[in-house]
Image (cartoon, helix red, strand yellow):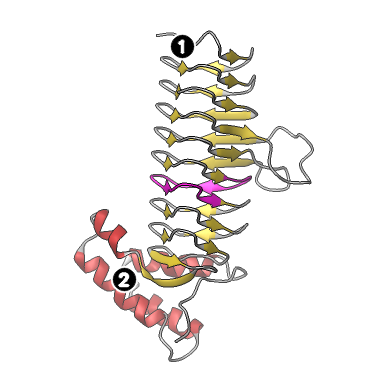
Amino acid sequence: MPANIHPTAIVHDGATLGADVEIGPYSIVGPKVTLGDGVRLISHVVLDGLTSIGESTTIYPFAMLGGPPQHLGHKGEDTRLIIGKRNIIREHCNFHTGTVMGRGETVIGDDGLFMASSHIAHDCIVGNKVVFANSGTIGGHVQVGDFVFMGGLAAAHQYTRIGRYAFVGGLAAVTRDVIPYASVWGNHARLEGLNLVGLRRRGAARETIAHLRSAYRLLFAEEGTFQERLDEVATDYAQWPEVMEIVDFIRADANRPLCMPSPE
């Protein structure tokens, strides 16, 4: 079926609309926007820039997607925002395109829930099946893995990495990288253990959780140096991919500080 466009909406020449698209009252779709099949703009949605939105995504009133990056070095270059399939994007969300100084695009995966006023800045990479609670915010160049939960009013500093399945508590200020499967909260955020609730909800095997817990205790013990403990974990748990995901995450970027437990 052709797009269903409300008479008060503005769809600029050049926009590409898939089948069964719904564009609600007072929405604006820019000339370089591409909407996949079944995308729904409830009302008062503004889509701008070189933006593509995957099929069956629903966008609620007053969201602004594809606006220029909030970066003083941006001079109006054609950079991208790519949003995947089946996302739910609630009221007042704002997601920005990339910068030529960065990767040139902001990329968001599939099946995410972005609650009201979530903010995704330029050049971010956000994985699949994430949840951003109200006003969850990530600065430029942040990487967020699959299944991450960002609590309400939580914020991640520019260039931070947040590993898969991590839980970031409400009001947390994340300035250091968060290992996969972790649970962090506080201002500034400290590592408070593993995201056991999230692991169980996602069906992780009891044996997997047990090995993650024992590897975590070894990695953040007091004996020896952190590098020695990391190497020991990599040797002792080489056959457990979830543990090695944490090891590989830490080794991938030695220049970034790591979110650590609070000192006793």
Q: Amino acid at mark 2?
A: Leu
Q: Is residue 143 magenta?
A: no
Q: Left of 229 or right of it: where is 65?
A: right
What type of secondary structure mainly makes up the magenta span? Answer: loop
Q: Secondary structure at mark 1?
A: loop
**Residue at which label 1 appears:** 3
Q: Quadrant of residue 1?
A: top left
**Residue at which label 2 appears:** 212
Question: Residue 209, which numbered label?
Answer: none
Residue sitting at x 28%, y 61%: 197
**Residue 81, position in %: x, y?**
59, 35
Along the line of sight, the residue nearer the viewer: 20 or 173: 173
Q: Amino acid at mark 1?
A: Ala
Residue sitting at x 59%, y 23%: 33
**Location of residue 246 with respect to 66 vertically, above or below:** below
Q: Is residue 134 magenta?
A: yes
Q: Mark 2 or mark 1, which has the lower sequence index?
A: 1
